[in-house]
């Protein structure tokens, strides 16, 4: 008799496991973004509900499939991955730019960019991901800043921007030690050039402007071509 009970338990367990596996499979391969122009569909194969993140990406493109297991994006549909289709390296072939959002909040936006250039190989044209220089690393190497209770200074090359902040009477314990960059990082394509915009702030809630980095394709990667600081009116 005991073996009949054991058999039933195994069957019930298999049934519920099968149901669970079916549910997981139904939730996987979820379409989270697509571009008709580029003929691209992005799927997420894993949904981390605890942290509200899509993980383990799959890209259907030109009849083939590419896998990106380390890509992540928030599940909020307002921040779905952006698929841009432009000729970034000026070779007369349109490239793919995928902008992911890894986090967002009040005065915060953490974006990540991936560029895939169309390349001719002996098996035909394929998309290959190309390294994009990190905008924060570019800022650390090229931008000098200074912050006191009286003024914020941002210098890029021989161009210096001085912003008077004395009138705001910011309490010393609210003011950062230096101008900070990184809580807001955005990417876009402007006139077929990849552009990163990074907010500069002096307190958790006060931004004084934005560093804009325009990229160019050079030495098999995307590097900074032009770096500008655009101050914003603060009151």
Image: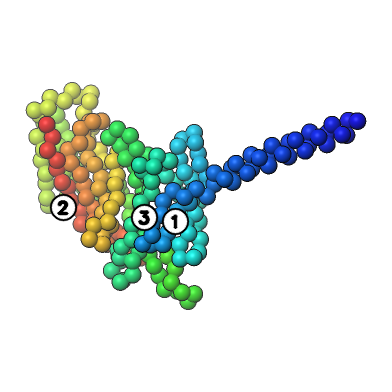
SS category of the residue bearing label 3 = strand
Location of residue 130 with respect to 228 vertically, above or below: below
Which residue does the numbered mark 1 point to in the structure image?
Answer: 41
Q: Nearer the viewer, residue 9 or 173?
A: 9
The reply to whether discs 1 and 2 touch (Cβ–Cβ < 8 Å) is no
Secondary structure, mark 2, is loop
Q: Position of residue 33 (x, y in %)?
A: 41, 51
Q: CA distance from mark 1 to mark 2?
A: 42 Å
Instruction: Please tell me which residue lies in front, 129 or 82.
Output: 82
Residue pointed to by mark 2 = 157
Q: Secondary structure at mark 1?
A: strand
Q: Residue at x 34, y 37 (%)?
A: 104
Q: Counting other residues with Cα less than 10 Å from the Cα at mark 1, is it few (<14), some (14-19), or many (20 or more)?
A: some
In the foreground, 41 or 141: 41
Q: Between tags 3 and 2, which lies in front?
A: 3
In the rendered structure, find residue 221 and report the number of the disc placed on it. none
């Amino acid at each position: 008799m005991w073996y009949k009970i054991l058999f039933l338990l195994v069957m019930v367990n298999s049934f519920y496991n099968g149901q669970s596996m079916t549910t997981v499979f139904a939730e996987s391969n979820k379409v989270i973004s697509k571009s008709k122009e580029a003929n691209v569909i992005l799927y997420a194969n894993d949904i981390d509900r605890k942290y509200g993140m899509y993980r383990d990406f799959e890209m259907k493109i030109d009849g083939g499939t590419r896998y990106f297991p380390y890509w992540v994006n928030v599940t909020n549909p307002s921040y779905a991955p952006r698929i841009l289709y432009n000729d970034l390296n000026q070779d007369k072939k349109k490239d793919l730019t995928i902008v992911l959002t890894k986090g967002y909040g009040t005065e915060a936006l953490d974006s990540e960019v991936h560029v895939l250039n169309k390349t001719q190989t002996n098996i035909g044209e394929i998309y290959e991901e190309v390294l994009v220089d990190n905008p924060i690393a570019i800022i650390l190497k090229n931008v000098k800043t200074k912050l006191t209770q009286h003024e914020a200074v941002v210098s890029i090359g021989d161009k210096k921007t001085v912003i008077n902040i004395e009138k705001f009477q910011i309490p010393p314990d609210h003011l950062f030690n230096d101008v900070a960059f990184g809580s807001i990082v955005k990417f876009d394509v402007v006139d077929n050039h990849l552009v990163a915009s990074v907010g500069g702030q002096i307190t958790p809630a006060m931004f004084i402007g934005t560093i804009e980095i325009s990229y160019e394709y050079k030495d098999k990667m995307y590097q900074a071509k032009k770096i500008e600081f655009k101050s914003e009116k603060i009151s």
